[in-house]
Image (cartoon, rainbow, N blue to C red):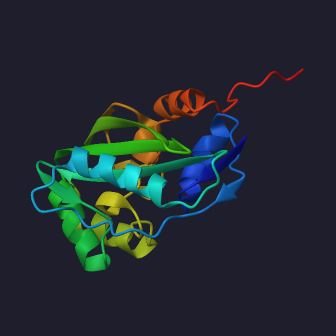
Amino acid sequence: MRLVLGSGSPRRRELLAQIGVVADDIRPPDIDETPRKGELARAYCQRMACEKALAVPAREDEIVLSADTTVALGRRILGKPADAGEAADFLHRLSGRRHRVITAVAVRLGQRLWERDSVSAVKMKMLSDLEVNAYLASGDWQGKAGGYSIQGPAGAFIPWISGSYTAIVGLPLAETAGLLMAAGYPLYRSAA
């Protein structure tokens, strides 16, 4: 059974490797990721994961795994910043506050689609201008929901989380393993 990862994220490949899964192919989908007017973060994230899984071309016998991670501050969705200015704005908004990180996972086999999501609470410490500027200069914010990644230098800004660390990074492993097994992927193969 072949597994297609519908994501170009190296973090998702690394997380899958932690549970012994190596995708047979990488096919990042090209979809419009604009939130709909009034769309809430969790519904948006679920929709994105499913749309990504459906947009990946695959044979009937290939399992497609896609995911989406969204940062939500109240009702506001903080996606991937377009530039350093927007990343700075996101970091200043998150500074000293709790926010939610939502990661939805979708697995498709033929016409069947399974989806799960994980919602984690994250607290960011109060950030100084020096910390924000140094982080922006690192470039680590690029392509990251909310303008930061917990597994990079911004990990020093996060004193507390409640939820799934792997979901905050970009792929909740417990949920992902369950979905892969539901689709018939031989996750825990015998070493014999």
Compared across the picture, whether 145 is left or right of 97 comes to: right
Residue 112 position (above or below residue 84) = above
When the figure is inspected, residue 28 is found, relative to residue 183, above or below; the finding is below
- Residue 47: x percent and y percent? 31, 51
Which quadrant, please, contains the N terminus?
A: top right
Horizontal and vertical percent position of residue 110? 56, 45
Say if 165 sits above or below 13 in the image.
Answer: above
Quadrant in which residue 128 is drawn: bottom left
| Nearer the observer, 188 or 9 | 188
The residue lying at 30 percent from left, 36 percent from top is: 120
Residue positioned most to the right: 192
* Residue 133 visible (yes or no): yes
Question: Which image quadrant for residue 90?
Answer: bottom left
Query: Dividing the image into 4 quarters, which one contains the C terminus?
Result: top right
Up the image or down, 129 lies above or below 126; here it is: below
Residue sitting at x 45%, y 47%: 169
